[in-house]
């Protein structure tokens, strides 16, 4: 029987929970544990957009801009948040507080526009509500 | 057997045969890019798609097994139309532009894209190239990667992992950002790359090539104050005529010498000379270490790809490596000492150039412990380009002899180019050094089940039977090292980084018209034709070698020999 | 007037102490073959989007030799507009678990995985708790409910890659590889996870299976049309007044009725510009095409596909290129990047669309888009790729006057 510890993705998630990202030495260890070249482990990690090989901001802000949310004005929300944080897609603030990502569907298409702050999902957002949430993070 | 119909021709094939193989059997050529016979199936380029039983969805011929009753159309109107569009997409991703174009590409005459374009019969190109803006990787002393030219066919990745057993490359990211990269994007020079250059041979485009040294060599040749000498490795002479239209395996030793003299080299020497010297030093070391039971087995040290491999993956065994420098570096060391003295030239003014079938030799020449004895290393490919751009067609030249002093060459040396050659020569010398007699026949029997690994037992005298091994290709090197780790007894093991040895080196000409195995086979035949046409000599019989020891080095393993001809290694691990 | 038919929907069911797994118990007493027979009798089609008969899948898996088989629940829902699996994972997780265990028992799998997309934080938490409780209660483990059925289930969190919703990509992902599709054959049922026979089923399919065994195939098969049995969870979103997850009996209403009666009508303008009936991989339908029944066969006849059941309504005055760009960016970003047609084709389409924000497309450009569409549909490696341009191509087909330059007189002359 496989334990969840034997499952690569679960192991990687756990490492990320500990460090906030997957440090190089951990990739070296993963390569040994899963008996794969370390380049391959690195390449596998880089495939997934929720896994990071560099430190991110304390809060990862993900805003969905897929079709359904787009029809609910996710673009305006996005512009307001970008403006507030002064960040483009994929950037991290210099104080390491925020990382901003424009993402595809988050599965709350009936409640758009939506924004995730780390694990937490906020739905039916207005610009005002979104900025309030971000303010509370500071 | 499976019976099917391909392009209206009945075919019968073994179960498990792919449609691609079945089509080739009846001489139907289906274009491919990501397919390479010796590698696993990737199924990414989709150029080999064919119609099966008239189905809407086309099937990749490389990954579809032939089955009874299949009706296959490999070049139907629909297939040809789809292939044209696929090819347009590939070219748009290949970033052809003013700066980056076929004329300046390292693969101008061996580009697989051009061969495929012809095979498909491309008649249109409607898409704009999309610039990816990726940075070139200049981190390695041996190999440059130009990711904008990469079409992500995965062949370098598979070659490195499956054939060489290393895996420094991987696909990273996904979607439009998918790219081939190294661990943590560190670049080839900062990871466990052995510089073997096999990836270059597999690359269908010019995304991978050697670090060019030709500009430096031109400058040196143009500089009247420099005394420029060149050495040519054994595997080069059976491949150098290829860029001039000759078949692989065409022997052009004398023509090469002639061409290099026309280029303006002040001395043209044969690396075989220092290969003998390597054998003398290494053979002496083997005898000493076998007698003293000192860190056995002795592992050969002439293949720089293998050296970097062991430094990364088996650093505990560095003490087993022979300390003898490779022939290239021995030549460099002697050129700037003994030769300088003999020729009356200030060592400062001597520029040493090597022509090697190898990309790892470039890295080797830059190792700090080598003191810059070799200034420039040209691959066979680069040498070919230089000769061509000097207006010389090597095939038309008369033969000339190597310069003396370091140029007395004889048969046994040429087989260094092939796997097993070094060991054979070393054994002859070791046998002579121990018994004082000549060893007439060596029988190296391949061992069942372990391709690319050879083992043999050579009785020396009543008390001693030498157990020797040979491994070529780094996957096999790893297998051999595992055997040694498990305790299998050897006295002496030869390692070559490249499959087939130096004739299959990463610096050899790339053929767009045949597989690398076919080229390898032909070059091998060339090597043995030289060997059989020449009178055999043993390293210890070579009169120039005797003279060198008498006049300059003393005897094999002497203090001076150690200072000039031996080296040390670095435990690198995976950092 | 369409109303919801509640076959899968019901009160929240998350607390393991409140549920006795009657379906699983019944399955264990029926025996493997009979369970599969009942699923086959129900004519359940897979609800992930491809619509493969679940009974057939299970019976093929049961026939596979080998003592190690895996059963996987695909909860990597990620196609824009689709959120019905999340509804089940959050509201009725025990039904999903029950369906999964029934399936595992039926095909002879003793180990399973539920792969939930990493963004679904709440479902992940819910399942983590359920799995812990189920192990404590002996619902997972050895000799389940006194039978000789042993089964353990591991939760795997996805990490942000839509393409892992393809079953072979999902298998690669669980194996720790890049989530790229595999070349079929071999199919997962023959050679799947870690080289063993593997069944991958969608969340909704498993919830259906649980209810079918609970209530009997008869009740399920009596619902719907001849070719589309039972009910379907539909995710309504876009320019619509009452978005959400609705359960609809196949054939009991038209798309138009679903949009108006359940969805409360269009929220952006008076009527839809077009409707996407089954997620971003399905062709758009014009308002006049919406009078088609909600079933696999009727939507197919209308020229599209029911897909995953995601109905996205696009209002009358929306800008088409903007919509096309969103769709194209999704496919461009989410392709696995392995096969050239899908990777380069979607990139090229996106590139072309980006250059056309305010101007129409030439005939030649449209021809290029069509050629790329054909090449992708014919030669891409997996279903995601093959269908990636269906929607975009259909929009070009259906709105030529809005998107494509008129052929000028001079050109007409020249073409003659």
Image: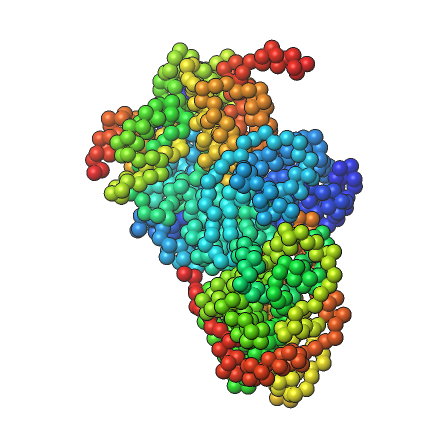
Quarter of the image where one finds residue B117:
top right
Q: Horizontally, is B403 left or right of C225 in the view?
A: right
Q: Horizontally, is C370 left or right of B31 in the view?
A: left
* Residue for point 29% across, 37% down: A117
* Residue for point 45% across, 19% down: C358
Furthest residue toward front: B224
Judge whether B163 appears above or below C38 on screen.
below
Is any part of residue B255 visible from this angle?
A: yes
Q: Which residue occupies the foreground of this view, C200 or B69?
A: B69
Judge whether B475 appears above or below B534 on screen.
above
Q: Horizontally, is A114 left or right of B282 in the view?
A: left
Is any part of residue C175 visible from this angle?
A: no
Quarter of the image where one finds residue B461:
bottom right
Q: Position of residue B70 (x, y in %)?
A: 72, 39
Q: Position of residue B121 (x, y in %)?
A: 69, 35
Q: Where is residue B225 in the image (x, y as percent from the top left)?
A: 53, 63
Q: Where is residue B368 in the image (x, y as percent from the top left)?
A: 45, 67
Q: Which residue occupies the foreground of this view, A115 or B246?
A: B246
- Image quarter of the C terminus of chain B: bottom left
């Amino acid at each position: 029987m496989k334990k969840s510890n034997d499952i690569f993705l679960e192991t990687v998630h756990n490492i990320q929970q500990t460090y906030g990202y997957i440090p190089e030495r951990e990739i070296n260890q993963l390569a040994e544990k899963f008996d794969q070249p370390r380049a391959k482990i690195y390449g596998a990690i880089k495939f997934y957009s929720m896994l990071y090989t560099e430190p991110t901001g304390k809060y990862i802000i993900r805003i969905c801009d897929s079709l359904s949310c787009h029809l609910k004005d996710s673009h305006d929300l996005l512009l307001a948040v970008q403006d507030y944080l002064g960040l483009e897609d994929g950037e991290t603030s210099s104080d390491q507080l925020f990382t901003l990502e424009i993402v595809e569907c988050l599965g709350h298409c009936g409640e758009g526009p939506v924004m995730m702050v780390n694990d937490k999902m906020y739905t039916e957002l207005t610009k005002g509500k979104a900025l309030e949430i971000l303010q509370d993070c500071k | 057997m499976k019976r099917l119909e391909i392009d209206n021709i009945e075919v019968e094939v073994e179960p498990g045969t792919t449609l691609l193989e079945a089509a080739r059997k009846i001489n139907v050529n289906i274009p491919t890019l990501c397919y390479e016979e010796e590698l696993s199936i990737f199924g990414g380029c989709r150029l080999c798609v064919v119609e099966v039983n008239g189905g809407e969805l086309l099937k990749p011929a490389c990954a579809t097994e032939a089955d009874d009753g299949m009706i296959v159309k490999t070049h139907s109107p629909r297939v040809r139309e789809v292939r044209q569009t696929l090819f347009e997409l590939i070219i748009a991703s290949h970033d052809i532009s003013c700066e980056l174009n076929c004329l300046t590409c390292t693969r101008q005459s061996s580009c697989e894209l051009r061969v495929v374009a012809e095979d498909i019969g491309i008649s249109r190109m409607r898409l704009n190239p999309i610039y990816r803006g990726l940075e070139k990787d200049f981190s390695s002393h041996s190999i440059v990667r130009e990711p904008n030219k990469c079409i992500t066919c995965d062949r370098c990745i598979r070659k490195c992992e499956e054939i060489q057993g290393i895996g420094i490359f991987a696909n990273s990211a996904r979607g439009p950002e998918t790219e081939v990269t190294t661990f943590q994007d560190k670049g080839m020079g900062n990871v466990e790359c052995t510089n073997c250059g096999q990836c270059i041979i597999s690359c269908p485009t010019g995304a991978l090539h050697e670090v060019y040294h030709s500009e430096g060599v031109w400058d040196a040749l143009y500089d009247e104050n420099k005394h420029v000498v060149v050495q040519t490795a054994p595997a080069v002479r059976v491949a150098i005529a290829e860029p001039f239209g000759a078949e692989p395996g065409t022997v052009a030793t004398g023509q090469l010498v002639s061409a290099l003299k026309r280029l303006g080299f002040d001395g043209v020497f044969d690396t075989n000379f220092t290969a003998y010297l390597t054998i003398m030093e290494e053979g002496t070391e083997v005898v000493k270490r076998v007698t003293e039971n000192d860190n056995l087995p002795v592992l050969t040290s002439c293949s720089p790809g293998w050296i970097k491999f062991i430094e990364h993956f088996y650093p505990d065994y560095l003490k087993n490596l022979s300390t003898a420098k490779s022939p290239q570096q021995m030549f460099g060391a002697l050129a700037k000492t003994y030769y300088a003295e003999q020729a009356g030239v200030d060592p400062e003014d001597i520029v040493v150039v090597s022509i090697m079938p190898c990309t790892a030799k470039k890295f080797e020449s830059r190792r700090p412990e080598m003191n810059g004895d070799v200034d420039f290393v040209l691959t066979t490919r680069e040498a070919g380009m230089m000769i061509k751009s000097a207006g010389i067609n090597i095939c038309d030249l008369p033969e000339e002899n190597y310069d003396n002093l370091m140029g007395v060459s004889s048969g046994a040396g040429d087989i260094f180019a092939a796997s097993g050659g070094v060991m054979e020569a070393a054994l002859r010398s070791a046998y002579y050094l121990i018994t004082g007699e000549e060893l007439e026949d060596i029988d190296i029997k391949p061992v069942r089940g372990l391709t690319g690994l050879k083992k043999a037992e050579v009785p020396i005298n009543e008390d001693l039977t030498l157990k020797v091994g040979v491994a070529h290709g780094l996957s096999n090197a790893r297998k051999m090292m595992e055997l040694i780790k498990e305790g299998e007894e050897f006295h002496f093991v030869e390692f070559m980084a490249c499959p087939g040895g130096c004739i299959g080196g990463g610096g050899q000409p790339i053929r767009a018209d045949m597989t690398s195995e076919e080229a390898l086979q032909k070059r091998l035949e060339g090597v043995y034709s030289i060997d059989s046409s020449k009178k055999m000599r043993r390293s210890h019989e070579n009169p120039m070698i005797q003279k060198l020891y008498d006049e300059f080095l003393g005897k094999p393993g002497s203090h001076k020999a150690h200072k000039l001809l031996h080296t040390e290694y670095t435990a690198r691990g995976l950092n | 007037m369409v109303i919801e038919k509640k076959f899968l929907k019901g009160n929240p069911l998350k607390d393991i102490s409140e549920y006795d797994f009657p379906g699983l118990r019944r399955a264990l007493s029926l025996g493997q073959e009979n369970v599969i027979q009942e699923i086959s009798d129900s004519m359940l089609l897979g609800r992930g989007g491809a619509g493969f008969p679940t009974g057939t899948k299970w019976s093929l898996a049961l026939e596979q030799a080998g003592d190690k088989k895996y059963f996987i629940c695909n909860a990597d829902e990620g196609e824009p507009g689709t959120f019905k699996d999340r509804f089940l994972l959050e509201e009725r997780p025990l039904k999903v678990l029950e369906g999964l265990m029934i399936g595992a028992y039926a095909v002879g799998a003793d180990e399973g995985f539920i792969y939930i997309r990493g963004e679904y934080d709440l479902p992940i938490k819910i399942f983590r708790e359920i799995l812990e409780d189920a192990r404590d209660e002996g619902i997972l483990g050895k000799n389940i409910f006194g039978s000789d059925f042993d089964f353990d289930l591991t939760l795997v969190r996805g990490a942000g890659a839509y393409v892992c919703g393809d079953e072979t990509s999902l298998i690669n992902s669980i194996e720790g590889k890049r989530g790229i599709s595999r070349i079929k054959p071999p199919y997962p049922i023959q050679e799947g996870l870690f080289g063993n026979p593997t069944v991958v089923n969608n969340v909704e399919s498993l919830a259906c299976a649980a209810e079918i065994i609970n209530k009997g195939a008869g009740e399920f098969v009596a619902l719907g049309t001849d070719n589309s049995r039972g009910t379907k969870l539909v995710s309504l979103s876009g320019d619509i007044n009452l978005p959400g997850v609705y359960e609809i009996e196949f054939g009991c209403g038209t798309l138009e009725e679903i949009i108006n009666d359940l969805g409360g009508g269009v929220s952006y303008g008076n009527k839809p510009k077009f409707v996407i009936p089954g997620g971003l991989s399905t062709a758009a339908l014009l308002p006049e095409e919406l009078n088609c029944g909600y079933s696999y066969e009727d939507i197919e006849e209308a020229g599209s596909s029911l897909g995953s059941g995601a109905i996205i309504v696009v209002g009358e005055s929306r800008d088409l290129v903007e919509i096309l760009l969103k769709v194209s960016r999704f496919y461009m970003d989410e392709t696995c990047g392995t096969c050239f047609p899908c990777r380069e084709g979607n990139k090229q389409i996106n590139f072309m669309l980006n250059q056309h924000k305010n101007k129409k497309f030439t005939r030649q450009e449209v021809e290029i888009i069509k050629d790329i569409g054909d090449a992708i549909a014919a030669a891409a490696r997996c279903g995601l790729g093959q269908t990636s341009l269906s929607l975009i191509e259909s929009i070009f087909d259906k709105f030529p006057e809005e998107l494509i330059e008129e052929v000028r007189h001079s050109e007409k002359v020249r073409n003659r």
